[in-house]
Amino acid sequence: MQFYLATSFIFPRSLRLRLFTLCFVATHLPLLGYLVWGLATGRIALAEFVLLTLATIIGTGIALFGIGALLNPIHALAEALHEGKDDAPVLPVVGDVIQTLYAGVQRARDRIDDLHQAAHEDPLTGIANRRGFLAELDALPADRRRGCVAIIDIDYFKRVNDLMGHEEGDRVLAAFATRLSALVRRVDLVARWGGEEFAIFFQDCIEDEASWSLARIASRMRTHPIGDIHGRPISFSAGICRWNGGELEDALARADEALYDAKQSGRDRIARAPSLLQEV
């Protein structure tokens, strides 16, 4: 490591040129010694010196070409990691230090991907969790950060766990996540908000469109239920709020308040957050 840092001033942006410089100097030490001796003694043979110099330069070039080819797998992997590509080349197992380093970097990369997925995906339902939902919204360009956010709660979910057990509760959660994902557009984002609560971002939608979409899902829940409680299909309540790219926390809080109103009004219904002008 110290030698690497000490030589970093030599072509700091190109490892290949740095290697060429070091190899050129190292391989030409005998030639330089011969040159100094010949000049000091006057016994230098110019033709032999030129021929030896050319041969040494050619040999150095061949050596550097081989070193560069041996380093190509590391360069390819580094470029794939830097550009965020998923198609890094596969290196056959040969057992040398390059292959060991390559395999170690690949394992580290896979581990990072697994950790990122675990941090942003709900393991039970396979959709985004709260952190993943917020991260996806934060990553949207400014012109797509508008639409409606909805907070959704499965009605009387506690009774599912109490009457039929937690395994059935987990099945209902997974089935509900699948139902939501299947019945919204591909541009909309669906996430498990926590417990039996879910969140949806309806991109570039007004309240009427988001409400209609949720009403369609609610109707589907009645005609093709994912489960029942005391013979009644499992339903949900939802709160919707318009979001125009401002403070997302405010829109989510207002959607949560609308959800509370829907539940207080008897559940199995969809409520909209009042506009700021209406509140004023």
Image: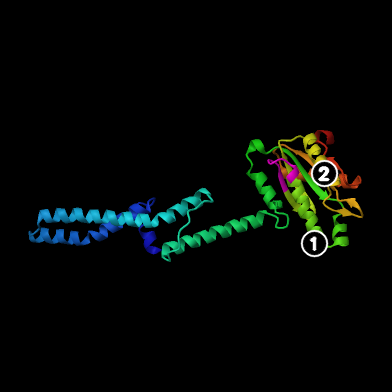
- The image position of residue 266, as x and y in percent, is 91, 46
| 118 displayed left or right of 258 | left
| Mark 1 secondary-structure assignment | helix
Tag of residue 220: 2
Towards the viewer: 128 or 247: 128
Q: CA distance from mark 2 to mark 1?
A: 23 Å
| 230 displayed left or right of 38 | right
| 258 displayed left or right of 110 | right
- Occupied quadrant, residue 205: top right
Say which amino acid is labelled 2.
Answer: Arg
- Occupied quadrant, residue 262: top right
State the residue position of label 1.
Answer: 167
Q: How many marks?
A: 2
Residue stretch in magenta: 182-190
Q: Is residue 209 above or below residue 110?
A: above
Say which amino acid is labelled 1.
Answer: Glu
Q: Are discs 2 and 1 less than 8 Å apart at CB?
A: no
